[in-house]
Image (cartoon, rainbow, N blue to C red):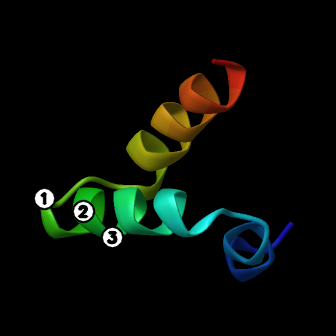
Amino acid sequence: MEVREKYRQLSPDERVAIAGLKMQGCGVREIERRLGRSARN
């Protein structure tokens, strides 16, 4: 699945969290790892 497709399925809060991670210099893998963890909670 393309990254943009994934982003369309995210809630606004998740988008903000991802933007914050990107600003901290986190890579896509790190973001996906955190998203995977938050999705399970």
Residue 24 lies in quadrant: bottom left
Q: Are marks 2 and 3 in contact (CB under 8 Å)?
A: yes
Residue kind at label 2, given as amino acid type: Gly
Q: Quadrant of the C terminus?
A: top right
SS at mark 3?
Answer: helix
Q: Position of residue 36 (x, y in %)?
A: 63, 31
Check the image and report above or below for 14 versus 4.
above
Mark 2–mark 3 distance (CA, rounded to whole Å): 4 Å
- Relative side of 20 to 6, left or right: left
Q: Are marks 2 and 1 in contact (CB under 8 Å)?
A: yes
For the point 55% across and 44% down, the residue is 32
Mark 3–mark 1 distance (CA, rounded to whole Å): 9 Å
Residue 19 - label: 3
For the point 57% across and 23% down, the residue is 37
Mark 2 neighbour density, 10 Å: few (under 14) some (14–19) many (20 or more) = few
Residue kind at label 1, given as amino acid type: Gln
The total number of labels drawn is 3
N-term mark: 3 or 1: 3
Residue kind at label 3, given as amino acid type: Ala
For the point 16% across and 60% down, the residue is 25
In this view, the mark in front (2 or 1): 2
The residue pinned by badge 1 equals 24
For the point 55% across and 69% down, the residue is 12
Residue 14 - label: none
Mark 2–mark 1 distance (CA, rounded to whole Å): 6 Å
The residue pinned by badge 2 equals 20
Q: Position of residue 7 (x, y in %)?
A: 67, 72
